[in-house]
Amino acid sequence: MANNYVIIISIQAYPFCIISTKYIKLKDKIYEVFLMGIFILFFTLLIVATCKINELKNIQYNQPEYLADKKILTIYYSNNGNTKNVALNINYIVGGDIKEIELVEKNYPNNIFTMSKQVRKQIKEGVLPRIKDIDISDYDIIFVGSPIWNFSMSLPVKAFLKNNNFENKTLIPFFTYSGGAKKSRIVKEIEELTNTKDIKKPLFMFENRICLEKQQIIKWINNI
């Protein structure tokens, strides 16, 4: 056992993005490895908790004229929580109602490789998932949130846009992504799915910076 070593690689939560590698002798340092794991877990949970607390802090915000006296809905689909996080912040700022797009069948898998395979298959076959009905008839302005899948909107959000009537409604899209996004193409897709051109400038947020860019959301809302 004297020559046996284990490589411990730890990735601390964003925004620090610190990757540390330690070579620890198994026989003498196994307790140290255990303590390191406990510390990393505690530190990660602390970062997540701080992010959640920041969502509830008072935000200095003056409602822009285009939102005045309007019935507002924030609606979103979120597979891993990132888009939900942005949706909660938008709803907290502008008020109104908030709803989640839900699938009739089971949700997409969390494993990104399995999910990507399933999404590519559905795109190739031209299939959209079945979603639960959402009544949007009472709303004037609808913020629509989606993660980016395969450089475009998620399929549940495409289904929502296709299934509903957006006549006399203003759409304000927002997206979260970790890779690439064909931004101009996405806006064109929304126009095609909804048969409307009353679509405001979308917000694109990189997933790892959501907790740090609350002011970006406010600036976007104020300057649409």
Image (cartoon, rainbow, N blue to C red):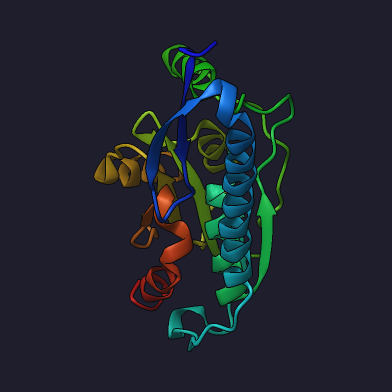
Residue ID at (55%, 22%): 26
Q: Quadrant of residue 151?
A: top left
Work out whether residue 134 can be spotted. yes
Work out whether residue 140 can be spotted. no
Residue ID at (59%, 56%): 48
* Percent of width and height locating residue 216: 37, 69
Q: Quadrant of the N terminus?
A: top right
Side of 39 relative to 154 (left or right): right
Side of 120 relative to 78 (left or right): left
* Percent of width and height locating residue 69: 59, 83
Q: Is residue 3 shown above or below 132?
A: above
Q: How many marks?
A: 0
Q: Quadrant of the C terminus?
A: bottom left
Residue ID at (28%, 45%): 183
* Percent of width and height locating residue 208: 42, 50
Q: Quadrant of residue 16?
A: bottom left
- The answer to which of 136 and 73 lies nearer the viewer is 73
Residue ID at (54%, 67%): 90
* Percent of width and height locating residue 80: 58, 40
Q: Is residue 96 shown above or below 183?
A: below
- The answer to which of 178 and 190 lies nearer the viewer is 178
Q: Quadrant of residue 3?
A: top left
Side of 75 relative to 133 (left or right): left
- The answer to which of 155 and 166 lies nearer the viewer is 155
